[in-house]
Amino acid sequence: METENKTNFIRDIIEEDLRTNKNNSIVHTRFPPEPNGCLHIGHAKAFCLNFGIAEDYNGLCNLRFDDTNPIKEEEEYVESIKEDIRWVGFDWEDRLYFASDYFDKLYEFALKLIKDGKAYVCHLSPDEIREYRGTLTEPGKNSPYRDRSIEENLELFEKMKTGEFKNGECVLRAKIDMASPNINMRDPIMYRIIHAEHHRTGDKWCIYPSYDFTHGQSDSIEKITYSLCSLEFENHRPLYDWFIENLEIFPSRQIEFARLNLTYTVLSKRKLRELVEENYVTDWDDPRMPTLSGLRRRGYTPQSIRNFCDRIGLSKADSTVDIALLEYFIREELNRTAPRVMAVLKPLKVVIDNYPDDFEEELDAVNNPEDPDAGTRKVPFSKVIYIEKDDFMEDPPKKFFRLAPGREVRLRYAYFIKCESLIKDEQTGEITELHCTYDPESRGGKSPDGRKVKATLHWVSSKHAVEAEVRLYDKLFTKANPDETGEGKDFKSNVNPNSFEIIKNCKLEPSLKNAKLGTRFQFERLGYFYVDPDSTKEKLVFNRIVTLRDEWAKIQKRNR
RNA sequence: UGGGCCGUCGUCAAGUGGUAAGACACAUGGUUUUGGUCCAUGUAUUCGGGGGUUCGAAUCCUCCCGGCCCAGCCA
């Protein structure tokens, strides 16, 4: 694979630590998803980073579910997240953890802070807490409950734990500084009361630690040396450090990096959820979704996703990566690995008038010009074939090289044919059939007399064709930045109405008859396609993963 | 507006005082039985802007401008 040196600010930090033998030169990271939704390509950036760094520095990376909020989290997401990470190709071995595994330990930590006079039970209501917190520009003020005795706090916290209070009646707070310019330090909440069943601990607890009182300690318990997270947690770092310091536990270090944004899609759980719930897409694994399950369903490979994550780099600058880069990596891989095959999506019937009526023959076709070991196959040819509708124009513009009246082109691996006449539907004017003649001397697509044609078309013999359904996917949004909307509208107004097209009765070459589920092909001149799980013995269903680069499409776009 | 962070090609991104890597995108030409692939070439005299230090600055200092994050008992 790539031999280039990966370099970024986090690796710089690690290498400096290695030089000074900090942490005894141990590199231990973790990927900490909350099980409240599906993973997307942005999460892949994060776990490729965490697992990748561990791999490169002989370290380890844990998988830890950050499950501190029972009302938002569900078991089914735990499984889907594990499946997605495994699919991309990472292994946490026996290091699967849950923040909820630490609830007992966390409770002891809370007790210690109370005993040290650094935490207190506060009976202010949520509204009052907000008021007392102050604003961005004004300091907050101390809670009237802030100076309770340690004994009283211990007693009240015990009561919180045993369920003597209702939801919202009180919280446990860290006693830090209500005047701090960092709002996260204004006596942050450590525990809140939630009478709800937790997916792992059941009804054992009715108090649950907050993110801030969980994350750093969990890192510390697992002896994580580098806790990598996204930029929005920068403001939390002083608090992360405060808990670790005051608890006198292993000092994990939090380092923040910029999360991934991609053009023509959204990468926020909330927005993706809206697309699912309001039926803009069929589900989380809709092939248009940037979720890992969506990309998988679309036909993307794990390797292409890893290559992408390796290539996009890492920094603290807010960034939006061009989705063309993701497409580049899947094309790059599939160009090397996918067998070529001929398929006509929108068929136009072509009768070769001078070809013998009941004759048929088999022609040799190369499976993959990039891979000589892939060999060749036989493709049947006969008098009536299909070509792509787009490959014929009655009145071709200047740069159109394909078939047109009186023009000669090559049928790939077959013959040169020349268009002699066409038949139209009298009602609609639509072209329904072409009549051509072929040059028997050009068998195999060769040009015995050195005659040149400007185009080579793919085709499928009518009587040998296998029918299939093909699903075409395009960008989910019409705007590079879906959040760029008209007044009063939201990102969903930019959903691309043409992002999904379903084509039935496509004509495939017969070698595809037994195409296996989950395999990928290049349909010559069209793109890369994936056998969708909806396929049955009777009917194959293909997803278009991505088109080939298309010079003609560019020309057309330019002229428009 | 208090605090934190960020600003290098259209998009990511290297660069850490010695004279702007690379990738994608884009453009042009060549090869080609895929308008694919491949190959070659071209794209930042300049690093948000101004001042300063220095023989020398994207890198140091300073002022200014722009963007992102924080006022959940979410993570």
Image (tube, coloured by chain):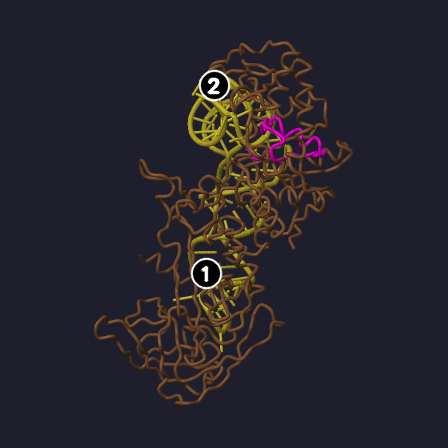
Chain colours: A brown, B yellow
> Judging from the image, what secondary structure is the residue with disc 1 in?
strand
Subunit bearing disc 2: A
Residue topped by disc 2: A130
Q: Given the image, on which type of amino acid does mark 2 rest?
A: Arg
Dot 1 or dot 2: first in sequence order is 2
Q: Where is the N terminus of chain A found, in terms of image quarters? A: bottom right
- Write down the chain letter for disc 1: A
- Residue under label 1: A547
Q: In this view, does A221 lie above or below A479?
A: above
Report the side of A199 relative to A405 (left or right): right
Q: Nearer the viewer, residue A166 or A459?
A: A166
**Front in this rendered view, residue A18 or A188:** A188
Q: Give the range drawn in magenta.
A: A202-231
Element class at badge 2? helix
How packed mark 2 is, by other alpha carbons closer than 10 Å (few <14, some 14-19, many 20 or more), is few
Picture quadrant of residue B54: top right
A311 in magenta:
no
* Image coordinates for residue A114, horizontal then vertical, percent: 66, 16
Q: Are marks 1 and 2 on the same chain?
A: yes
Distance of label 1 from label 2 (alpha carbons):
52 Å
Q: Name which residue type carries label 1.
A: Thr
Quadrant that contains the C terminus of chain A: bottom left
Q: Is residue A106 left or right of residue A417?
A: right
Residue in the foreground of this view, choosing between A400 and A121: A121
